[in-house]
Image: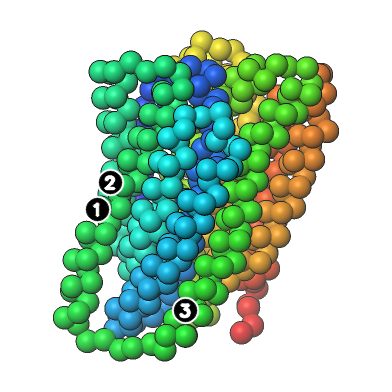
Amino acid sequence: MAIFYKGILFLALSAFLGEGVEFLVNLILAKELGKHGLGLYMSILPSIYLLVLLSSFELPVSISKFVAEKEDRFHRNILYHAITITIIFTSILLVVAMVLIPFIPVFDGYHPYTRWLIILLVPVISFTSVARGYFMGRHHMGKIAIANFIRKSIQLVLLFLLFRFFQFDSEASVLIAIASFIGSEIAVFLYLCYMLIIQFQQLKRMPFSNLNRKAVRKNLMAVSVPTTGLRLFSALTGAIQPFLIKAALVRSGLSETIATEHFGMLMGVAASIGFFPAFIAHSLMTVLIPAVSKTYSNRDYSTLQKMLSQVMMLTFLYGVPAVVVFYVFAPQLTSIFFESSTAASYLQMLWPFFLFHFFVMPMQAFLIGLGLIKETFIHGIWSTIVSFAIIIVLSSRSEWRMDGVIIAMNTGSVLLALMHYLSICKSIGVSIFMKGLIQKNN
């Protein structure tokens, strides 16, 4: 448990610095791209995240879970098989991406080089995922924290230098924003792969035992495949959401340009501010997956119950004050990006979405650690169906428009958090009010 809390503290502190850098990144993007350019950038970002997800194949989750459950002498063998799987998978995905991406219409409104830049992410993300998963499983959270900080710092430096010393038209500016994102991922790849090579050399000097190749691949695939399915669904819906929202707004009577600007204010300004405290939730999620997996493999339900209680309390203690600050100081916070009362109202109305999102992330890590990936997937489907239905019904009406979008986002977040929480309580044998702990039978 000491390693668990130390990991959370270290990741949270470093992530706080990283989020500060991320805030500056979004500020530069808002100033340089403008409302319409920021809307275009935020619209294509979910599609990029979709490729990132496919490239990672959720190996950070499966490897960290497997490494945490196994003794040190098996780690070298696990890494060997994980790298083999990655090489095969990356080769296939790279060929598919090169064939399909040039014909995907989503990229039609962007610079022609955008497609080819994005393809670079496939090998970069794939091999970074192996290193990230191993260090997560070994609780080497310092390396993960440094990698996260490198990503955001490199992106900030690239954006600052390029926009400071060069002038670009609107199309090229969006391309530069995307290129800086990809450049930061390459920097993380170089760092983590270098650290993994050093770690692998140390493992070669230690006693080791082999695991059956099929057993290793089966264990990795047992987590990677369903978790990738879960994340793939989230990424697909995330990629669809911008276009669904803009289509609904256009149907309500807004022009496509105005709809894009409103989406840019929603996701580029309000969401950038509202998600700032999520660095704590990300830190909890990173540490919880291997910690819960190991504890659950030992059938230590009392520790799991204690961990859940403490995680929920910690989330409440930082989440509630954060959304209060956002609500009270929304005009001052959004004016850093744009002088717009509209963006401020979006931030204020989205407080339930942000608050419950802070709870969803660590609870999802709990569910993965408990092996409840199927339940997590089903919860995501239901919350998305409800959210999208509200967008279609309300946002396409002239009297609702963006209010309907915000109602949909809030409803989906609350529903998802409640379903996650009930499933966790049932699995580890605790009442929903964290009282009267139930003795869980093996």
Residue 178 coordinates in the image, percent (x, y): 42, 34
| Secondary structure of the residue carrying numbered label 3 | helix
Amino acid type, mark 1: Tyr
Pick whichever of labels 2 and 3 is earlier in the sequence: 2
Q: Look at mark 2 in the image and give the residue it sits on.
A: 187
Contact? badges 1 and 2 (CB < 8 Å): yes
Distance of label 2 from label 3 (alpha carbons): 29 Å
Pick whichever of labels 1 and 3 is earlier in the sequence: 1
Residue 195: quarter of image: bottom left
Distance of label 1 from label 3 (alpha carbons): 26 Å
Q: Residue furthest top?
A: 339
Q: Look at mark 3 in the image and give the residue it sits on.
A: 217
Residue 59 coordinates in the image, percent (x, y): 45, 64
Amino acid type, mark 2: Ala
Query: Image quadrant for the C terminus?
Result: bottom right
Distance of label 1 from label 2 (alpha carbons): 6 Å
Residue drawn at (42%, 89%), measured in percent from left and top? 212
Label 2 environment density (alpha carbons within 10 Å; few <14, some 14–19, many ≥20): some
Residue 262 visible somewhere in the drawing: no
Q: Look at mark 1 in the image and give the residue it sits on.
A: 191
Residue 440 visible somewhere in the drawing: yes
Question: Is residue 303 left or right of 192 when viewed as pictured?
Answer: right
Number of dots carrying numbers: 3
Label 1 environment density (alpha carbons within 10 Å; few <14, some 14–19, many ≥20): some
Residue drawn at (41%, 24%), measured in percent from left and top? 172
Query: Height in image: 208 above or below 172?
Result: below
Q: Nearer the viewer, residue 126 or 394?
A: 126
